[in-house]
Amino acid sequence: MDRRTRRAFVVTLGAALAGGAAAPAFAGTSASSGGTAVATDNSKDGSRDRAKGKRPLARAHAHNDYEHPRPLLDALSHGFGSVEADIWLVDGQLLVAHDATDLDPTRTLESLYLDPLARRVKANGGRVYGGYDLSLQLLIDLKTAGEPTYLELAKRLRRYGHLFSAAYGGVGGRVRRGAVTAVISGDRGARAPMEAEKVRHAFYDGRLEDLGSGVPASFIPLISTDWTKTFTWTGAGPIPAAERETLRRLVASAHDARQTVRFWATPDVAGPERDALWRELLAADVDYLNTDDLAGLEAFLRGAH
């Protein structure tokens, strides 16, 4: 995008901001799935993973997935079971970027995620990973005001409704599991319009305060929190006994409610400290390991640790 176009989008965005295992029902393949690592799949939709012997890794979460050379497809080529996309509502479009300065009108949610997923699911007989019963988690982080951004997003999800898990009958309604499960994170203003929907193609990313609140996993299937807000241990030496107990208690509480758990801001520099922390998370049965290092987490989960 040229400098003039980028500047126009940033100005428009500024105006918009001023105005305005316990696995739940979506899991299928075991979170601890292993398998043989294979070469990167270079097909347009990434649909040849199964033919090359790739087994998906349900625990692997691609943080800021869109910053990789091939958004979505690089994570799928490594077998990831969850990917994250940050979106901004700008002039009726949902643009994917981490910061406003990176907005590009060609990088829409449809072009980077929804259309490639539709092609892949069609090619793989109704699954993201052909032959494996795993619903890919698409974590969508709302960067602009939650209510209007979600309402626009909900329109998009309805258009691709055949891809997505859906809830019927409001917050406590029944769930139909799809090839992809959209979970809404970021700005908390999305919660009210989501609660008001009778048919929903997305679910809400809860926080620690939602644990034990009685809100069902059919609305909040995932609990996410910043690792550094609860824990001081970053992988050096043994984890303090009190922190290990806290970690396992939090995970057990979520699993009792059929909710999954993800921590962001965990150390992500390759080395023994990261491996030690990942091992501790696995031992506690944390459902998603958060990383920007696709190859590193794949190697770890496939047995290199």
Image (tube, helix red, strand yellow):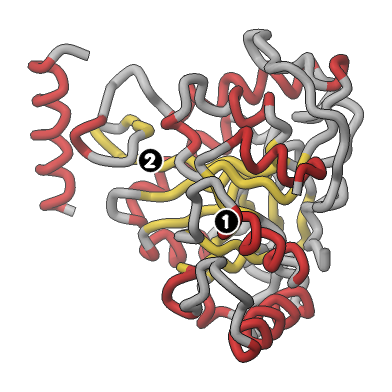
Residue 46 in picture, x, y percent from top left:
69, 17
Most foreground residue, 72 or 122 = 72
**Dot in front, 2 or 1:** 1
Q: Is residue 175 left or right of residue 43?
A: right
Q: Which residue is mark 1?
A: 274
Q: Residues within 10 Å of mark 1 (few under 14, many from 20)?
A: some
Q: Residue furthest bottom?
A: 242
Q: Which residue is mark 2?
A: 87
The image shows residue 304, relative to residue 285, as above or below, that is: above
Q: Residue at x 68, y 38 (%)?
A: 80
Q: Residues within 10 Å of mark 2 (few under 14, many from 20)?
A: many
The image shows residue 133, relative to residue 112, as above or below, that is: below
Most foreground residue, 111 or 198 = 111
Residue 180 seen in render: no
Most foreground residue, 258 or 261 = 261
Residue 205 seen in render: yes
Residue 92 in picture, x, y percent from top left:
30, 32
Residue 117 in picture, x, y percent from top left:
64, 25
Dot 1 falls on a residue whose secondary structure is helix
Distance from disc 2 to disc 1, alpha carbons, whole Å, reads: 29 Å
Dot 2 falls on a residue whose secondary structure is strand
Q: Are the two marked residues, 2 and 1, in contact with CB atoms closer than 8 angstroms?
A: no
